[in-house]
Amino acid sequence: MKADDLTLFMQEMADVVPLKQQTQAQTRAKPLSSESKQARKAAAEAHEYLQRLTLDLALIPRVKPDDMLSYKQQGIQEAVFKNLRLGKYKIAAELDIHAMSVRQARDYLLGFIQAQVALGHRCVLVIHGKGQNRKPFPGLIKTCVNFWLSQMDEVQAFHSAQREHGGYGALYVMLPKSEAKRLESRETNHKGAGFR
């Protein structure tokens, strides 16, 4: 700056009063609402869940198109599993994913299972097909469904369906009882109830 410019600047600034400085900067962010926290938590859980339900075919044990599929978690009673295997439970809903791509099949399957649990449905049918002519190997979707269902916390058991429901191209899937059904069962089966 030239001397004349500095003098002119000082004259202009003569009546300016400095602002009082605050010792702390006001940078506190607004706390997240509980809805935002829940949405973030749900997104993180969904991401973790999708990681378990891999699309990497090298990590999924293969099954053959005509293999019978069967799975049950510990604690499922044999009589309950036998009824599932024999198709004795009412099928509340069904999903047909046999002609989908692997990614579509996974996403539809996960959404379907979670929706059925939310609705309180106990037994559903998943049609995966046998996939005799699927590429890169026969039984592609069947292989993936077998693996994915066994990785889902909501799935208590599954078994290949009876012939009238699709045979080895479909699965009966058992989901957990809703809280209302558990309470109803507890009351119905309560030991010592009633008069003696």
Image (cartoon, rainbow, N blue to C red):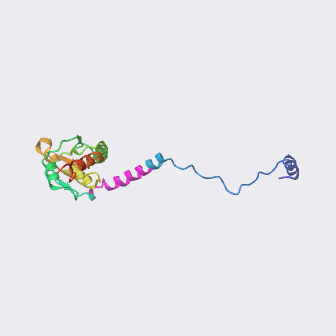
Q: Nearer the viewer, residue 193 or 7?
A: 193
Query: Could one spot residue 115 in this view of the protein?
Result: yes
Q: Is residue 110 above or below residue 75?
A: above
Residue ID at (37%, 51%): 46
Query: Could one spot residue 177 in this view of the protein?
Result: no
Q: Main secondary structure of the magenta part?
A: helix
Q: Nearer the viewer, residue 123 or 103?
A: 123
Query: Does residue 13 belong to the magenta stretch?
Result: no
Image position of 58 (left or right of 31): left
User: How many numbered markers are drawn?
Assistant: 0
Determine the image quadrant of residue 58. Answer: bottom left
Across and down, in percent, residue 5 comes to 85, 49
Image position of 64 (left or right of 108): left
Across and down, in percent, residue 53 comes to 30, 53
Residue ID at (23%, 45%): 122
Residue ID at (67%, 56%): 24
Across and down, in percent, residue 86 comes to 12, 48
Determine the image quadrant of residue 129. Answer: top left
Query: Does residue 54 belong to the magenta stretch?
Result: yes
Across and down, in percent, residue 67 comes to 14, 53
Which residue lies most toward the left here? 163
The residue range painted magenta reads 40-57
